[in-house]
Amino acid sequence: MSSTEPASPSPQPSPAAPAADAPKPSWYRRMYLRVEAAASTPHALATMMAVSVVDGSVFPIPPFAVLVPMVLAQPKKWVRYCLLGTLASLVGGLIGYGLGAFVGEGITQLLHIDLDVRVDRFGVSGTVGELLGRNFWVLALLCSILPTPFKIVAIGSGLVSVPLEQFLVASVIGRSVRFFLVGSVVRFFGPTARKWLRV
């Protein structure tokens, strides 16, 4: 009579190794995501306008973090959103200009604004401070094309005494181009526009 060997016990699954803690996002990233999430709330428009105002003075997050998902959600309202965002941004620019003009060097140190940063793009060469003081049309270029935070342009213009009327003209051009360019690209190209935009 043949005897059957006892089956060897099946190996027990080893306990899963604890998942490595994901790196905690930076404060900037957390704030960006919080602002972006506001686009899906009933207060999206108010949030975008508020961010647009403070974007010209102290806030490090661009208003386009709210504008892009708003236009994706309601593309037919893109012109209204861009117009209101532009107007709010101009108000913020005036606040930033005033901070630069009346507070001076202290505000640039407080907000870590470096006017000695060099810009060498599109045939434009010089530090931000030099460009703002030399030619106000460069200000429009910085506002609309280059990824330069608007608060640097606004506060820097007040600091280096760019004439207020020139600052306003350049800001109207720059912020209008920036808002309507971003809004129109999102409106007509949809979610794929996120790949092309730095917002």
Image (cartoon, helix red, strand yellow):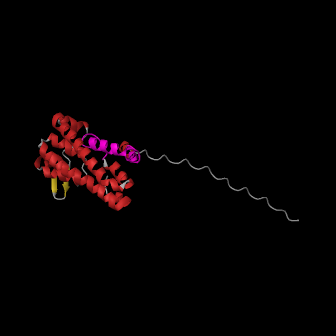
Task: Identify the residue at horizontal 31%, vertical 41% (top origin).
Answer: 50
Residue 196 seen in this snapshot: no
Magenta region, main secondary structure: helix
- Residue 146 in picture, x, y percent from top left: 23, 54
- Residue 187 in picture, x, y percent from top left: 33, 58
- Residue 199 in picture, x, y percent from top left: 32, 52
Residue 70 part of the magenta-drawn span = no
- Residue 65 in picture, x, y percent from top left: 34, 49
Compared to residue 190, the image places residue 88 above or below, namely above
How many marks on residues? 0
Compared to residue 32, the image places residue 7 above or below, namely below
The residue furthest bottom is 1
Residue extent of the magenta highlight: 33-62
**Nearer the observer, 45 or 128:** 45
Residue 54 part of the magenta-drawn span = yes
Task: Identify the residue at horizontal 11%, vertical 43% (top origin).
Answer: 163
Task: Identify the residue at horizontal 61%, vertical 49% (top origin).
Answer: 15
**Nearer the observer, 132 or 43:** 43
Residue 11 seen in this snapshot: yes
Quadrant (top left/top right/bottom left/bottom right) for the N terminus:
bottom right
